[in-house]
Structures are given as structure tokens and as C-alpha cells.
Amino acid sequence: MRLPSTILPGTVAILAVASLLPACSPGDVEGARLDSDTVFQSEHHAYRLTTVVDGLQHAWGLAFLPNGDMLVTERGERAPDGEAGRMRIIRDGRLLPDPVPGLPTIRVGGQGGLMDVVLHPEFESNRLVYFTYSKPNDDDSMGTTAVARGRFEGDALHDVEDILVAEAWVEGRGHHGSRLAFDGDGHLFVTVGDRQVRPVGDLAAHPAQDPTNHIGTTLRIHDDGGVPADNPFVGHGEILPEIWSWGHRNAQGMAIHPETNQVWQNEHGPQGGDELNLIEPGVNYGWPVVGFGVNYGPGTPIHEAVRAEGMVGPVHHWTPSIATSGLMIYTGDAFPRWQGDIFNGGLAGQQLSRVRIVDGRAVTVETLVPEQGRIRDVRQGPDGLIYLVMEDRAGDLAPILRMEPADQQ
């Protein structure tokens, strides 16, 4: 199926459009566990929410297997009080009780643990699964973002190996980034957060502005971890060759347009200034020198300006923040009038944002699934329906929901 030509490169613009309310009020439902008869009305489609499976703790990423199974990651709770990160299997609508064996040692705590999961584009022949996790050093005093892959057979991971260990080692356990996406040429894109390094003092000296490390970057690698020869900084002295873009805070959503191969990301701002960015090679996206957010609590300024020469601003920003998470570009037939639109999950905002891009501008920004809980990931299923990975911040068990059309036929 061919998508409409709505997502095109162009100049940056910001246009917020008022969101539409659902046909029911938030008080009609409790949390994310809905009566499937509840109908929400959006600008183009009416839809229902149904529970696919329940009982997940701090779920983070979701991948669909060709046989109809689903793999879902659980970030984990810091030992000794909780479980380490786990990968789970959903089969025939049931969450299997035993986690997938074969994971490496994971540094769990704060925002760190087991995070994203994707399949190799040729999974049916090579059975390779890729995942991100927070990797500890030898004495667990520091951690970084790592990408590993393993062969998935017999409901277990085999021959697991790290293909990328980011140069982003810090003592803290925050802002790992960790989204993965394959482009149409088989390159793997990886986000690495700014590791919660405080934006104080000389902002231009912040490590997210220093491409001799991987902090606050988007990386582009081969499926075995090698560096593509056409990466923008190959052969540029001390700049790390995996870097595709830099100057990011914490990108937790990423998707690649299946026709244009454009890389789209959302990025956590601080108190305000969550961003939707079109990612171009060799570009500096400005954190923390420019942006739209302020310091948590007092609301004092962080940035020198909202834009600066040599730094690219967002296509859209959310102020106040919605705490952006998973990102998806819709291509299915279940919601035909949404084809080509970008969908962003919201954690603190408890919403799904639908963004339509025309000529590089956000011409529609609509709020869907309001106040039904924290949305950690957004995926399109093989059935063309939209799957939402929900998360309870306190660690209570939460479901995966599915958006189904409720339009009159």
C-alpha cells in the first residue's frame, strides 16, 4: 500500500492545533482497563480500546513475531527488592509466565533496565532479535546504554552478544534513550540519552554538545555493530563515527518512514519543550543550548535561546510537556484517514498525540486516548491496529491495549 505524500522535508515550523475530546468523559472509565463498548471520537475515526493482555510491570518495548506471538520487555525493578529486566512472550492472547532466558547482566534502577526490542528485517531467516539495556561496569558503579542481539529459538535467546556499548558511562541511572529502528537499507538507528547530566554553567560544554562521546546522540550502525562508511563523521578526527546526529536530551521514540526513509524522533524536554524532530545526518539539535523548557520546580531558564545558528529546532514541541515516549508512523488499513500520520505516546501527559506533517510543518496535532494511563510504547500490529504499551509509574501491573475502529460501516 502506498502512503499519502504528507511527510516531506522542509523548514521547521510549529503549529499547535486544538485537540478533540472523546465521546465519553475520563470519569466514565477507570485507569486503562476499559469496557470495550466505550467509544472515543476523533477528528477522522471513532475507536475503542480493548485489553490485549494484563499483568506487565514497567513494560517498555513491543515487537511482533511472524507466528503471531509478541515479545515485550519489562524494564525491571532495582534488586534486591524487585526483578531484573525481563523479556516476556505473549501467545494466543496470554502472557506466558516464564521470562525468555539468555539475557545479559542488566543494571536495573531509576530509568535503567531492559528497554527496547526490535526484530532484524530478515528475522524469518536469521531469527535475530535486537534489544537495548543499561549495561554495568565491572563493579556496578557506572552504567551505559548497550545494544545486544541474540538468536531467538525455542522461546529463548541464544548466542547473545553486545554489538554496541555506548561511550556514555555515568554513575546515574537516568536518560538512556534506547529506542531502536531499522531503516529500509538495513541500517540500525539507536538513541542514546544525555544521561541526565545537569545543564548548568557553560551550556556549550555539556557532553551532549561534544560528539567525541555518545551522550545525547542518534547513532547509525550496521546490523553487526559496524560503522557505515557514509556516516557523516567517518574520518573526522576524534568525533565518534557511529554518530548520525547530536545535541539531544532523551529520545525515547523513533520511527523511520517506510517510503521516504526519513528518521523521526520525539525527545523529552525538561519542564516543557518535548520535541518532535526530523533527524538529518550531521545535525546538532541544540540541547541544552537551545530549547523551550525550563528548570524543574522553580521554572528558571535553562537555555540561551529557543534557536541558534548551526542548531536545528523541532518540527513541533509540546509545552507543557507530555513526556513523550514511543513513536509510530501509521501505514495500516484499519484507520485509512490516519495513514502517514505520526503517533506519539505520552507518559505524564497520559495521551496519544496524532501529528500530521505537510511540507515539513505540523498542520494537525490531535490528542487521542486522553487520561487512560501512561503510554510507554506505540506500535502498529500486523493487523493494522494500534497497540499501546501501558506503564504504571509505581510498578503496579499494567496492560497492553489495542485501538480498534468503531466507525459506522
Image: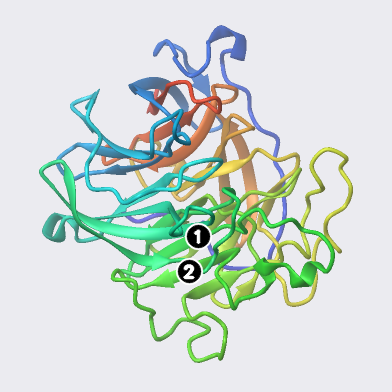
Residue at image location 49% in from the left, 29% down from the top: 391
- Hey, what amino acid is under mark 2? Leu
Task: Specify whether 159 is left or right of 87.
Answer: left
Residue 343 can be seen, yes or no: no
Disc 1 to disc 2: CB gap under 8 Å: yes
Name which quarter of the figure residue 394 lies in. Answer: top right
| Displayed quadrant of residue 408 | top left
Q: Which residue is identified by label 2?
A: 219
Q: Position of residue 223 (x, y in %)?
A: 30, 69
Q: Which residue is nearer to you in this view: 138 or 167? A: 138
Q: Residues within 10 Å of mark 1 (few under 14, many from 20)?
A: many
Which element is circle 2 on?
strand
- Marks 1 and 2 sit apart, C-alpha to C-alpha, by 6 Å
Along the polypeptide, which appears first: circle 1 or circle 2? Answer: 1
Please determine whether, in this image, residue 395 is positioned above or below residue 14: above
Towards the viewer: 246 or 309? 246
Pointer 2 local density, CA inside 10 Å: few below 14, some 14–19, many at least 20: many
- Residue 141: numbered disc: none
The kind of residue tagged 1 is Thr
Q: Which residue is mark 1?
A: 191
Secondary element type, mark 1: strand
Q: Which residue is depicted at the point 49% across and 25% down?
A: 395
How far from the left and from the top, in percent, is residue 355?
57, 46
- Residue 178 coordinates in the image, percent (x, y): 47, 54
**Residue 370: which quarter of the image?**
top right
Residue 52 vertical placement versus 137 (above, below) = above
Counting from the top left corner in percent of width and height, residue 20 is at 63, 28
Q: Report the side of 291 relative to 279 (left or right).
A: right
Residue at point 47%, 58% (across, down): 145
Residue 399, placed above or below residue 282: above
